[in-house]
Amino acid sequence: MDIAVKPVRVALVGNPNSGKTALFNALTGAHQKVANYAGVTVERKEGRVQTATGRSVSVLDLPGTYSLRARSPDEEVTRDAVLGRLKGETPPDVIVAVADATNLRLVLRLILELKAVGRPMVLALNMYDIAQRQGLRIDLEKLQAELGVPIVTTVATRKRGIDELVAQIDAAAGSTWSEGETWTAPDAAAIRSAHSRAEQIMRATVRPPERPDTLTGKVDAVLLHPVAGLAILMALLFVMFQAVFAWATPAMDAIEAGFGLLGAGVGAVVPDSGPVWPLVESLIVDGLIAGVGGVLVFLPQIIILFAFIILLEDFGYMARAAFLMDKIMGGAGLHGRAFIPLLSSFACAIPGVMAARVIDAKRDRLTTILVAPLMTCSARIPVYTLIIGAFIPQETVWGFANLQGLVMFGLYAAGIVSALVVSFVIRKIFWRGAVEPFMMELPAYKTPDVKSVLLNLWLRAKIFMERAARIILPLMILVWAASTFPYPPEGATLPAIDYSFAGMIGHALEPIFAPIGFNWQMVIALVPGMAAREVAVAALGTVYAVGDVDASVTALEALRTTIMAQWSLATGLSFLAWYVFAPQCVATLGVVKRELNSWKWMWVMVVYMFALAYLASFVTYRIAVALGGG
């Protein structure tokens, strides 16, 4: 193969919040895939781009790092990827160092470390428009001469400088480098020397702005204020949770109507005669369509939640929220940097647990991982929405707030408070000592790129839909089969489901859950719900549809009506309390085991969360019954 068109691998390396992912999206667009590195749970994002010469370039977006010394698992992956040490991964041919043009001080030392690796390198000076707007004067020619690497200025969110960067990557790919180059971790003297060299380069090439950016300072004075800042943060979270419940209703109604029409269409097509066709119709309508539709109906709520998180991250607010929460979280025994993993857990506990790798201290990271699943993930939304819709009236309070949204906000607040309380107890029982001081770079404010936001939303929606196809669909077939077979004996007087395998399992476990108000149908829903929390809603729909005389009970509203008729208010509240605390997600437990490389701590999590769930449900149920809700 001619060397001019030989495919190359490029690694994007940079500090956190340098705009690296935005640059990756600008380079690769939709030509990217997300997976995990072999043997570790660090997310692996790779995409492709083609140069003007026809060369195929594979671009790898590596986790953010401040140094190749690697003090956290994320940084270890970046170091090993750059050095070609990752299992099953070929070393990069070219390194693209991504720097925030408004904050070069820290990245210069990383660039010097990357140079020592010996591979061809290009420096992408990103967010250059913000640096110019702030009045920063960067001598590009001198900086390029000092570093000895080509420099391209980019604005990733506007795709400026992307063609020039691809051209420089193409040129660097033709460079030669020694396979014999070896990298060794710098000692204290080398680190001091690199730091001094970085400071020298900074002084020589970057001059303070003639027009200081007073707007950022004014905005930060409000957003970082200990009182006003916290009030704004709470207001943002309140709006987010109200939006999750209120804004998604039209789209949810449309999806529900679509699945209802699909079920009715299938019912009209399938013949009524014969011993097999009614069974086929039940499998398709009550099992598959009701099961998958009962989960996908909540997709609009999940997209809204992810949209808020992505926009706040892109805007530059997340780091400021972490700064605001540092004192509160520190009082509960959590590191300030734990705020971002915990906030990520609102979307899903798995990325939240994985995001704890940014915390250097092992004990602080462990505490964060142990409490991350207590945050209300998007998989709980279907359960919360179902129960709230059944027992909480749709009405406005205080003239502006949706009552159902307020209850949803209360459930999220319960998760947050419980996480803080548990972390406080963990620090007092398992280990003591001061929490490490919190230091984080505050990124510049920037306008989120619409295309990048939409691309990220599509990827998250795609993952959710694939989860529905890969996990929920097979589970619903199992639930339907367990709820259908064996058939009731001759002369049976109870509903058919009472004689099925599911009925047998539910009745056997019911005495354990009776003190917290659960009936045997709820127990059945908890079992497949261990694979994925949202399956519980689909399982309830299948169980009640199969067990009911009217087999059309497949829509969300019909399921709510059934629950209202068969559950008491105390039972519904107890079910909500259970889902605030219970570790109803095997995938999360698996990730915890892999992240901590310990069965012990995974089982500690299982035991304490189930104990909390049972206790909370017991107390909630008994109080509700005493107040007349039974």
Image (tube, rainbow, N blue to C red):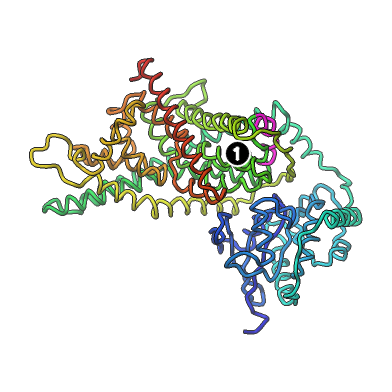
- Mark 1 falls on what kind of element? helix
Please name the predominant secondary structure of the magenta segment in the image: helix
Is disc 1 surrounded by few (<14), some (14 to 19) or many (20+) residues within 10 Å? Answer: many
Looking at the image, is 140 positioned above or below residue 175?
A: above
Name the one closer to the observer, 256 or 113: 113
Q: Residue at x 90, y 55 (%)?
A: 200
Q: Is residue 328 visible?
A: yes
Q: Quadrant of the C terminus?
A: top left
In the image, what residue type sits under mark 1? Thr
In terms of image quadrants, where is residue 363? top right
Looking at the image, is 394 positioned above or below residue 207?
A: above
Name the one closer to the observer, 349 or 460: 349
Which residue lies most toward the top here?
627
Q: Quadrant of the N terminus?
A: bottom right
Looking at the rendering, the stretch of residues picked out in magenta corresponds to 318-331
Q: Total number of numbered labels?
A: 1
Q: Is residue 348 visible?
A: no
Which residue lies most toward the bottom here?
2
- Describe residue 233's horizontal placement relative to residue 108 as left or right: left
In x, y percent, where is residue 507? Answer: 25, 35
The residue under label 1 is: 367
Q: Is 5 included in the stretch rendered in magenta?
A: no
Name the one closer to the observer, 179 or 466: 179
Q: Residue at x 56, y 52 (%)?
A: 456
Q: Residue at x 52, y 32 (%)?
A: 415
- Describe residue 630's horizontal placement relative to residue 159 as left or right: left
In x, y percent, where is residue 203? Answer: 90, 53
In x, y percent, where is residue 168? Answer: 74, 70
